[in-house]
Every structure is written in C-alpha cells, then in structure tokens.
Amino acid sequence: MARPKRIYVCNSCGSTYSKWAGQCEGCGEWNTLTEEASENSPTGLGKSSNAKGNIIELSALKGEDEALPRMKSGIGEFDRVTGGGLVPGSAILIGGDPGIGKSTILLQSMSKLADGGHKTVYISGEESVAQVRMRAKRLGLAESNVELGSETNLRDILATLSKGDCPDVVVIDSIQTMYADTIESAPGTVAQVRTSAQELIRFAKKKNVCVLLVGHVTKDGQIAGPRVMEHMVDTVLYFEGDRGHQFRILRAVKNRFGGTDEIGVFEMGELGLSEVSNPSALFLGDRDGDVVGSAVFAGMEGSRPMLVEVQALVAQSSLGTPRRAVVGWDSARLAMIIAVLDARCGLGLGAFDIYLNVAGGLKISEPAADLAVAAALISSLSGDPIAEETVIFGEIALSGEIRPVGQADARLKEAEKLGFTQAFIPSKMKFKNKKIKTAELDQLIKLVDIIAPNLGE
C-alpha cells in the first residue's frame, strides 16, 4: 500500500506547501505551517467508475417561489442584521474578539427562540454545561428551555442532533474546537475546521436546521481558519467594539437572505447585551455645546442612517516625523485628506501631530465621512468650533472637489429627527428635505471659509 503523501498547510490562510518553511509566502505569518496527510486527488469521473451520472432537472429563471420562512428571535437588532430572522436550513458564521459578547448574544437569542416554542440546542466545545448554566443564571435565562451539550467530537454531535426530532436551531461554540475523527490533524487546523464546517452545513441543509457557528478571529480581526469557510456559509456576522466601551456592533458582511452592511447596536450591561433602538441619540448623548475639533457625520450603515461624532486634535509636533493616530477610521484615507487640505487649501497640516477618533467605538468605512473629517481638522487647527446643530457629509476628491453621495434624504431626515437645523453637503445633490438649512459646497476651500474665515490671514 502506497504511503500517504504529506503536505504542509498554513493555519492562517490555508496555503499548502510540499515542504516545511518558517514563513508562509501567502500571508507572511511565521510558524503557522502544520503537517497533514493530503487528500486523495480525484482521477477523473470517467476513470473512477463506469456508472453514468443522473440527469438533473433544470428550471426557468422566471417563476414564483414562496417567501422564506423566518424564525424571529425577539431581539430586534439581531433579527435586523440577519435579514428579518433566522432561515431554516441556513448556516451562519459569527466572529469577534475574545470577550466581546458572542456567546452572550447567542445564548440570549436561543433563550428567546426557546420561549417562542422553537427547539434549540447549544453545543459548547470550550465550556462545560455547568459554566454555560452559570452564564445563563447571571443573565436571568436559567428558566429557558434551551438544551445544552458539551462536546467536541463531530461524529457524536451529529448523531445526537439526528436522534428523534431535529432541533430548529443549533449553536456550535466554537467551530475551531470541533474535530472529525477521519482527519489526522489536531482541532483548529485548516483541515479540521474545513471538514467540520462542511459536515455541519451539510447537516443543516439536509435536516432544514439553522446552524450558528462561532469562529475565533486572528490578530487582524479576520475569522481564523481557511477563507473558504466564509464562502461555504450563508451569512457572516462580525461582532465589533472596544471592550473599554459599553457599545457593541453586530455587522453583516455577507448575507444570502438579506442585505449586507446592516448593523445591530447593543449595549453591554449587568444582564448581558441590550439592544439600542436609536443609536444616533446614544452616540451623540455626551455632546454639550460647541466643541473645537468636533464634527457630526451623518452616515449610513446598510439601510440605517446614523449620526456619529468625529473628533480631531491638531497639535504642534516635536518630532521629525509628526505622529498620526486614528481610531475608527482608515489611516490611509486620513493621510489623503491631510494632503488635499495642504495642497488645495494651503493649511500646512503636514507639520502637526494629528489624532482622529470616532466617538463610541464605531468603525466608519464609507467615503462620505471625508467632509466631516476635514471639518474637524479645520476646526481643531483654527480653534473655531463648528455650530452644535450642524451635520456634515460628502466625499472629497484629490482635486479638492466635493462629490455627491447617496441616500441624502435618509441622512437629513435622521438629523432633523435629532434636532439638527443645518447641514454642510455636496452641491448638485438631489434631496426632498427642505426643513434643514443646507450649505451646498463644491470645493473644499469653501468649507475652510465657512468654518475658519480668518485662518489664512
């Protein structure tokens, strides 16, 4: 019998090599290659068997299908992110930093579903049943009819779930602790994670069960294990937030049954995570009067408008290379905004230390925040505050031009609801809201003239 061929697989990115190396060429990580037995490569459909394939039935693209049934968890923010509730037969992957609240939100959701008459099972590979019960008691969920299990053997878990009536929802916490006895590698390796996820997803589709998989994350914030796991599941959720803040953001980055980039906002308290129905008011709750270096950005997170405070500090630098510190925004985009303010407006920000922070621990990625960041920098440099009742949004081009962004009406409506009376927005934008006074800008230099008219003197 031929000896099985050995390969080396990177635990970080899944790249394979024929021999061991200290550094993975695919992702650049050190000491992540582990030895595994290679899977037998197929020899071709015609060579492996004389049997012919079955004819599959093809359907027309045009047709009527029934609406997807959904199981409401009773937690509005969680249901919003999943697209309106959990879909039977779907696989959901949720990742986040240790201690951010992944197990807490899932235990709360399972308890709500169980109270609503759904059969739910919570399988923990990291904690014992007693530990899960302690958390449930602390959260006030001890009376919920959730079935618990503590196991890491995938074969035993699937046999247990298939016995009798299948549950409606299953939580696997976490996928990195599961192991299949058909694979010769240790739990958490690329082969084990890929095989375990594949078997659980096959079980979900076959038995019409919703499976939620908890995933560990790397130091870069990406879900650990092979990237193909994110392609295999139907929905990928990320739990974001700083443990120093009480706010947590549950963000959908992939959803086959709903919109992507939807977010749910939660607040961590003594009784677990409570949903925040009006996050704009919460993120802006600590503002008091006109503050130098502070601007309110009217952003969009999926279909939800959200107002957040952007804070900037421009200070004299004693270093040869000025310091740049950014929290909650892209540092490369900040460098671009500084360069445009220097080249097109003549502000000379390049010689200063610059600190930028998005209040509340929220992370912003849309280009519409450019104008608010520029306004905060101008205000901090000049010492002139921006009026407290002003919101700002718009994209900045390298030429200094201010470009239009989408969903202006939703942004302005949210600002109006929270008492804002003025908005700095790009020119040539179409919107219906006439209650807020708007200053339409086409060039960045005009924003400088409004906020700090004496800056150039």
Image (cartoon, rainbow, N blue to C red):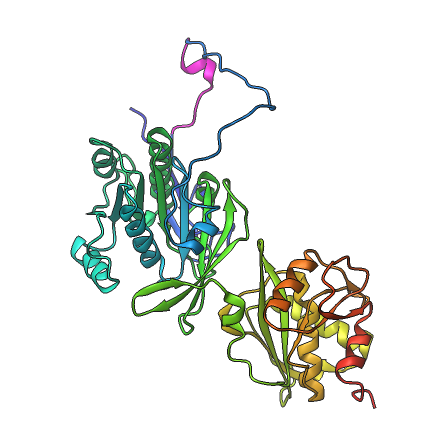
Measuring from the top left, give residue 182's x and y in whole percent. 27, 34
In screen coordinates, is 457 left or right of 304? right
Residue shown at 25% from the left, 35% from the top: 158
Q: Nearer the viewer, residue 85 or 99?
A: 85
Measuring from the top left, give residue 72's x and y in whole percent. 39, 46
Residue 10 visible in rendering: no
Residue 359 visible in rendering: yes
Q: Is residue 63 above or below residue 387?
A: above
In screen coordinates, is 424 left or right of 319? right
Q: Is residue 149 above or below residue 321?
A: above
Residue shown at 78% from the left, 80% from the top: 450
Measuring from the top left, give residue 454's x and y in whole percent. 80, 89
In reply to whether residue 46 is colored magenta, the answer given is yes
What main secondary structure does the magenta stretch of the protein show? Answer: loop
Q: Nearer the viewer, residue 52 or 259?
A: 259
Residue shown at 44% from the left, 21% from the top: 43
Q: Hey, which residue is sitting farthest front in the picture?
A: 435
Q: How many marks?
A: 0
| The residue stretch that appears in magenta | 40-50
Report the quarter where the N terminus lies.
top left
Quadrant for residue 18, please give it: top left
Q: Is residue 455 above or below residue 238?
A: below
Q: Hey, which residue is sitting farthest left in the picture?
A: 130
Measuring from the top left, give residue 117's x and y in whole percent. 28, 42
In reply to whether residue 207 is colored magenta, the answer given is no
Quadrant for residue 301, please give it: bottom right
Q: Nearer the viewer, residue 411 or 57?
A: 411
Report the quarter where the C terminus lies.
bottom right
Q: Nearer the viewer, residue 410 or 210?
A: 410
